[in-house]
Amino acid sequence: MTDPKRGPDRDSETGRAVAGNKLRLTHGVSAYLQTRRLPSVRGRRRIQRELVALRRELLDVVPDSDDVRRRLLVEQVVTSRGVVMLAEVFLKHAGLCQPARLARGIADPQPVLGLMRQYLDVERQALRELGFDRKAAEPILAPYEIVEADK
């Protein structure tokens, strides 16, 4: 029986994927959603830091964050942000189009783009439920409006 960590696409000593091998490149979204733990992907530590900071900031800002419903919405925002960030890292390295189809002249987008869009919608709806409504925010003034307001 052969060792699954060894093969033509892996380094014979370390068992890691050979540099430039995009066949083993995965986004890890499925593993993240099943286990609620970030998989071992490139940029894992940065994503983990940003998700912890996001959770902390949301719990500080959201009124009545001890309410179970609010805590669930905060967790939903953090989970969807994690999915989006994992997808962004994957797309940065794999490209927006499927390479096998692109080689044949067909520009098919990566399937993770659809998943990313779904979770962006989930995040937006959860933020709206938490009270972060785009329409209720203060409008952003253009530079000439700021000058006129100072007069």
Image (cartoon, rainbow, N blue to C red):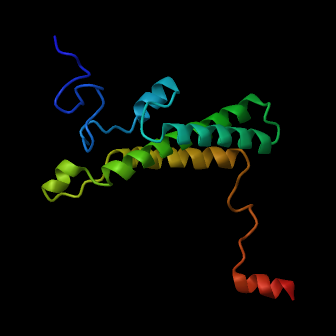
- Tell me residue 137's x, y (percent): 74, 62
Left/right placement of residue 92 relative to residue 35 reads left
- Tell me residue 30's x, y (percent): 41, 31
Report the residue at 46% width, 25% height from top. 34
Residue furthest to the top? 1
Q: Is residue 91 above or below residue 79?
A: below
Q: Nearer the viewer, residue 55 or 134?
A: 55
- Tell me residue 15's x, y (percent): 28, 26
Q: Nearer the viewer, residue 46 or 78?
A: 46
Number of marks in the image?
0
Residue furthest to the front? 13
Left/right placement of residue 122 relative to residue 5 reads right
Report the residue at 22% width, 51% height from top. 99
For the question of whether residue 53 can be seen, the reply is: yes
- Tell me residue 149's x, y (percent): 83, 83
Q: Is residue 151 above or below residue 92?
A: below
For the question of whether residue 80 can be seen, the reply is: no
Quarter placement of the N terminus: top left
Left/right placement of residue 2 relative to residue 127 reads left
- Residue 143 quadrant: bottom right
Report the residue at 78% width, 31% height from top. 67
Q: Nearer the viewer, residue 52 or 20?
A: 20
Quarter placement of the C terminus: bottom right
Residue furthest to the right? 151
Q: Nearer the viewer, residue 94 or 46?
A: 46
Report the residue at 32% width, 53% height from top. 95
